[in-house]
Image (cartoon, grey):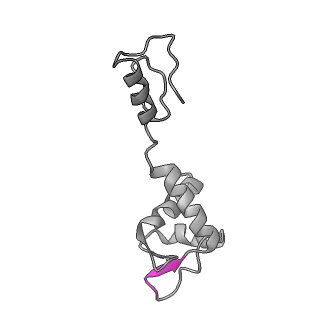
Amino acid sequence: MDTDRIDKAVLALLQLTLHDGNHAWKGLDWQVLDRLYKQGFIGDPINKNKSVVLTEEGLQASRQLFEELFNRPQAVPLAANGQEVGDVNAALAFLSRQGGQVPQEHDVLPP
């Protein structure tokens, strides 16, 4: 079992229960929380509180990992010829200048 990957996933999932700035509910595996504590990402999870406190480093890592692991990549719009279009409005303006005609292979779309 790859505990490093599990730790990263749990640290990312702490984003889902963040409250009061840097607190997250600690309803996760105690061994993982202990490892995150030893790595300096959270405060000591062994207490009577129902949440753990993320350190500044833990907050930053949690946000970054959440984005890396769980955000869908933004779709890049493609023109009719399969060329990437950086700005949909620019592409529509280009098509309008072309009289609504689909760009040809040699046409260059604006970035």
Total labels drawn: 0
Corner quadrant of residue 28: bottom left
Q: Is residue 96 one of those drawn in magenta?
A: no
Question: Does any portion of residue 35 appear in the rendered image?
Answer: no
Corner quadrant of residue 18: bottom left
Name the spot of residue 10 as percent of width and height, x first: 49, 62
Give the residue at x 43% y 82%: 50
Task: Examine the rendered structure and indicate whether residue 6 appears above or below residue 30.
Answer: above
Give the residue at x 44% y 11%: 104
Task: Examine the rendered structure and indicate whether residue 59 appears above or below residue 3.
Answer: below
**Quadrant in which the C terminus is drawn:** top right
Magenta-tinted stretch: 49-53
Q: Nearer the viewer, residue 13 or 99?
A: 99
List the single residue furthest toward the bottom. 48
Indicate left or right for 20 with 65 as reference.
Answer: left
Our reading of the magenta stretch's main secondary structure is strand
Name the spot of residue 61 as percent of width and height, x first: 59, 62
Task: Examine the rendered structure and indicate whether residue 50 appears above or below residue 90.
Answer: below
Q: Nearer the viewer, residue 68 or 43?
A: 68
Name the spot of residue 20 as percent of width and height, x first: 46, 80
Give the residue at x 41% y 70%: 17
Q: Is residue 51 one of those drawn in magenta?
A: yes
Question: Does any portion of residue 38 appear in the rendered image?
Answer: yes
Indicate left or right for 54 with 13 as reference.
Answer: right
Name the spot of residue 1 as percent of width and height, x first: 54, 52
Give the residue at x 53% y 63%: 11
Task: Examine the rendered structure and indicate whether residue 68 appears above or below residue 75.
Answer: below
Corner quadrant of residue 80: top left
Q: Nearer the viewer, residue 62 or 83?
A: 83
